[in-house]
Amino acid sequence: MVRLPDGRFLVFSEGRQISGGTEAVLFNRDPSEPQSEGRTITYLPPKGYRITDAALLPDGRMLFLNRRFALTEGVSAKLTLAPPLSKTPGATLTGVEIALLRPPLTVDNMEALSVTREGGRTIVWIASDDNFNPLQRTLLLKFALVQ
């Protein structure tokens, strides 16, 4: 879920797939308010990946965390970057891949994304959790986004 600067909320479905992508609902305001209205849009993740989180960058662009598990390749994650969300009905979100995490790099069940600022730099945080599974790890990764 991402709160946009204009007060809208974008909420992604964890598993519902539509039109080759992931269903998301764009609310015109806080979805807990009775007057809020939502419309369905589609996010197109990289092929074979599913979105697990999204975050807003200081300039209004959106960063998406996508993960994948394949028996032959193990786990991997891709970060994609998209321009600010338009107000056009029926929008389809898609991003440009900016990072790929896969072995031998440190990667696991990546599912959390956050963006902060430190000393004028944009910092991207990515986390996984082990789900109480001895085959998984809890990780917290920190990157500077070079623009």
Image (spheres, grey):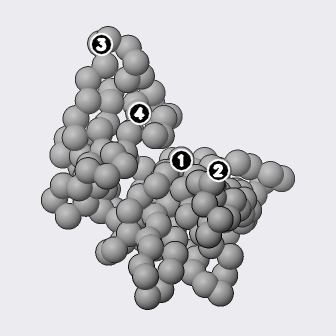
Quadrant where the C terminus sits is bottom right
Looking at the image, residue 29 sits to the left or right of residue 35; the answer is: right
Report, in whole angstroms, how far the alpha carbon at label 3 lies from the one at label 4: 13 Å
Where disc 4 sits, the SS reads strand
Q: Is residue 121 above or below residue 99?
A: above
**Lower position in the chain sequence, tag 3 or tag 4:** 4
Which residue is more in the foreground, 129 or 119? 129
- Tell me, for residue 115, which label it has, or none: 2
Report, in whole angstroms, how far the alpha carbon at label 1 lies from the one at label 2: 7 Å
**Lower position in the chain sequence, tag 1 or tag 4:** 4
Q: Which residue is mark 1?
A: 56
**Lower position in the chain sequence, tag 3 or tag 2:** 3
Residue at the extreme right: 119
Residue 62 percent coordinates (x, y)? 48, 53
Name which residue type carries label 3.
Gln
Residue contact between numbered discs 1 and 2, judged by CB atoms under 8 Å: yes
Label 3 CA crowd tier, 10 Å (few <14, some 14–19, many 20+):
few
Name which residue type carries label 2.
Val
Residue 104 percent coordinates (x, y)? 65, 87
Q: Which residue is mark 4?
A: 9
**Lower position in the chain sequence, tag 4 or tag 2:** 4
Report, in whole angstroms, how far the alpha carbon at label 4 lies from the one at label 2: 17 Å
The residue at the point 31 percent across, 19 percent down is 36
Label 1 CA crowd tier, 10 Å (few <14, some 14–19, many 20+):
many
Residue 77 percent coordinates (x, y)? 52, 71
Q: Which residue is mark 3?
A: 35
Name which residue type carries label 1.
Leu
Residue contact between numbered discs 3 and 4, judged by CB atoms under 8 Å: no
